[in-house]
């Protein structure tokens, strides 16, 4: 039986659990921590991550699409699943079939959910998203219009009121305060009209990690932090409250190792020419695996515990590195794309920066071709 792989990620379940617990600890009792496992848990594997978090006490998980929710049900996840961005006509029946909780974004959505649920003689819960100023998903209707839609949609039950922030990492901007004030005003008006949803939520990783406590209400929606990442602030300053660590290491095998003379052209377009005799390694991971094409001639992998600069263009299936600092490596040996080897480490934040992208995009870009291995 074959057990090795050409390119794989190792995901630590205990690290996921530790990160989840760090979040629970910081928000305290009475605040539900909902791990966001959309995009296959930022490629960490939604079923495994959900399982780990639910075993550690989570009661909800959040995904983006109905397909993602259905995949969790198929994987045996019985917990409450919030579907944050998919109340499309093609998806609505499946929401009910699979007991998924939709986030609704308009008053028409509320009336439609009521119609679907009453046709089945059931009562279906939903969360209503408020556009408090991000200008993306969410209703901009007034409290009285919302109350009216709710009042005439008895088979749809409002379980949560939520919003999402556009600039939580910008401490020089007042946008988060403005959005919070807008959300709070609407909450108060809705309460005055006798509507009291069980959950209120707004915060994702940044608003939790940097202590925007007034946005935590009784539910928070961290994704990035579950996987061990908190992006740096974009402006201003605030103390970081949580210590989380990456749960994923990304590795690949050396397919070939060889010595090339000074002047040798390396890879597509010959964008690298060896300035001296070099030992090079051809690594079995390319842009089809998620290594950003932008890393051509930029950045490094880790080989033999040392930085191994990327040479030439990243191609679809392979990436060439300089092994001059790791002369003992042979074909079949492992190099690290993300993770730690000896004293050298590289995380998604660092590699993303070199590739002029963001850590979220780098993680989500790890492709389905990359085998996932779970470790404790
Ligand atoms: C993706 C997402 C989150 C999680 O964001 P992180 O920054 O990864 O914590 C929370 N809420 C909504 C609506 C999202 O789309």
Image (tube, rainbow, N blue to C red):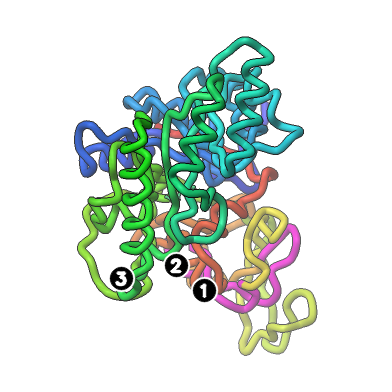
Q: 182 or 235: which is nearer to us?
A: 182
Mark 2 / mark 3, whichever is N-terminal: 3
Residue 304 seen: no
Toward which corner of the image does residue 47 lie, by quadrant?
A: top right
The span from disc 1 to disc 3 (Cα, nearest Å) is 24 Å
| Secondary-structure class at tag 3 | loop
Residues in magenta, as a range:
295-319
| Secondary-structure class at tag 1 | helix
Do residues under tags 2 and 1 come within 8 Å of each other at their CB atoms? Answer: yes
Residue topped by disc 2:
350
The span from disc 2 to disc 3 (Cα, nearest Å) is 22 Å
Q: Position of residue 341 (x, y in %)?
A: 41, 56
Q: Position of residue 210 (x, y in %)?
A: 27, 58
* Ligand 1 neighbours mark 1 (CB distance < 8 Å): no
Relative vertical location of residue 121 with respect to residue 329 in this rendering, above or below: above
**Residue 168 colored in magenta in the image:** no
Q: Residue at x 61, y 38 (%)?
A: 4
Quarter occupied by the C terminus: top left
Residue topped by disc 3:
171
| Secondary-structure class at tag 2 | helix
Q: Residue at x 33, y 56 (%)?
A: 180
Question: Which label sits on residue 94?
Answer: none
Neighbours of disc 1 within 10 Å: few (<14), some (14-19), many (20+) = some
Q: Residue at x 47, y 60 (%)?
A: 348
Q: How many marks?
A: 3
Question: Which label sits on residue 354?
Answer: 1
In this rendering, which labeled residue sits more in front, label 1 or label 3? Answer: 3
């Amino acid at each position: 039986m074959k057990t090795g792989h050409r390119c794989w990620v190792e995901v630590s379940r205990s690290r996921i659990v530790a990160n989840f617990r760090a979040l629970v600890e910081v928000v305290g009792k009475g605040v539900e921590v909902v791990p966001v496992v959309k995009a296959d848990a930022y490629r960490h594997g939604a079923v495994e991550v959900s399982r780990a978090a639910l075993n550690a006490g989570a009661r909800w998980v959040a995904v983006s699409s109905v397909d993602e929710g259905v995949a969790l049900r198929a994987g045996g996840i019985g917990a409450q699943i919030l579907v944050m961005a998919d109340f499309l006509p093609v998806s609505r029946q499946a929401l009910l079939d699979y007991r998924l909780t939709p986030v609704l974004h308009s008053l028409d959505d509320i009336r439609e959910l009521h119609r679907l649920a009453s046709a089945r003689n059931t009562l279906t819960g939903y969360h209503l998203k408020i556009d408090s100023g991000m200008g993306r998903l969410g209703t901009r209707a007034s409290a009285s219009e919302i109350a009216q839609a709710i009042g005439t949609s008895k088979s749809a039950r409002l379980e949560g009121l939520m919003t999402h922030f556009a600039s939580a990492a910008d401490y020089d901007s007042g946008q988060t305060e403005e959005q919070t004030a807008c959300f709070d005003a609407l909450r108060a008006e809705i309460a005055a009209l006798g509507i009291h949803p069980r959950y209120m939520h707004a915060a994702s990783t940044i608003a939790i990690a940097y202590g925007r406590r007034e946005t935590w209400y009784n539910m928070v929606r961290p994704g990035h932090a579950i996987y061990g990442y908190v992006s740096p602030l974009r402006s201003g300053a605030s103390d970081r409250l949580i210590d989380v660590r990456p749960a994923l290491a990304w590795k690949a095998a050396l397919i070939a190792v060889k010595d090339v003379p000074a002047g040798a052209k390396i890879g597509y377009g010959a964008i690298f020419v060896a300035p001296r005799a070099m030992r090079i390694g051809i690594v079995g991971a390319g842009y089809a695996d998620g290594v950003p094409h932008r890393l051509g001639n930029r950045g490094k992998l880790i080989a033999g515990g040392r930085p191994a600069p990327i040479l030439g263009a990243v191609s679809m299936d392979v990436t060439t590195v300089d092994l001059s600092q790791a002369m003992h490596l042979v074909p079949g040996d492992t190099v690290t794309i993300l993770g730690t080897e000896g004293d050298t480490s590289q995380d998604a934040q660092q590699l993303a920066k070199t590739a002029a992208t963001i850590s979220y995009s780098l993680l989500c870009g790890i492709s389905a071709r990359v085998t996932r291995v779970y470790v404790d």
